Image (tube, rainbow, N blue to C red):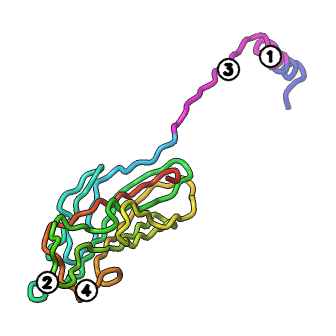
Amino acid sequence: MLPRSVFFAICQTILASVTYAAGSGETHIGIKARTYPGCSFSSASTALASQNMTLASSGIASSTVAITEMVDDATATLKAASIQLSLRASCNIPHRITLISAQGGLESDSENTSLNGAFLGKVGYQATAQWGSQGTTLITNGTPGQRSDAPAIVGPRAGDVNIEIKIDGTNNDTTLPVLAGSYSDTLTVHIGAPL
């Protein structure tokens, strides 16, 4: 047990310290920052799996997929093809993912106006995109600017977007010969505020 005089001296020292601290000044510095809303892709596409399709080129802003053999050599009918792609994305706001086909399918550059018989001159495809719990599907029908179904808006997310593109008999008459020519379309993957 401490003698009373020592205890009193310790208390006086503590009280003196408190008195000294109360006489000092202080200031507060606020720190502020702003993060602007944004969605972006941060990696080039990579191919996860494919059948009769290849990832011909890949970058953050765009990629090109090529069909290895579009038609069966013996019948000139459409061959099935598919590819699964993955790319990283982030979106720091509530958003949705949408697929948009510029031409509504693969359109031929052929200008054959005098056809004898029925030919497949526009090739439809299916595209699906999955990002976490959010997914959307586009089945092209020949309408330029066609958009996928509108999934629910979800909160901020970062991670892999998985995309699958398939060409088969779902929206193509595979009994018809395919018209000769070069076929192309642009599929846009949009993440962000609803369009």
Disc 3 marks which residue?
28
What's under tag 2, amino acid-wise?
Answer: Ala
**Which residue: 27% across, 62% down?**
185
State the image coordinates of residue 60 (x, y, percent, origin top left): 29, 50
Secondary structure of residue under mark 4? loop
Secondary structure of residue under mark 3? loop
Query: How far apart are the two marked residues, 4 and 1, measured between alpha carbons?
Result: 95 Å
Q: Is the residue 157 above or below the residue 166 in the image? A: above
Secondary structure of residue under mark 1? helix
Residue 25 falls within the magenta-colored stretch: yes
Q: Is residue 76 left or right of residue 191?
A: left
Q: Are marks 3 and 4 in contact (CB under 8 Å)?
A: no
Secondary structure of residue under mark 2? loop
**Which residue: 48% across, 65% down?**
132
Q: What crowding class fits label 4: few (fewer than 14 Cα within 10 Å), some (14-19), or many (20 or more)?
A: some
Disc 4 marks which residue?
174
Start-end of magenta stretch: 12-36
Disc 1 marks which residue?
13
Q: Could you say which is closer to the camera, residue 12 or residue 89? A: 89
**Which residue: 67% across, 20% down?**
28
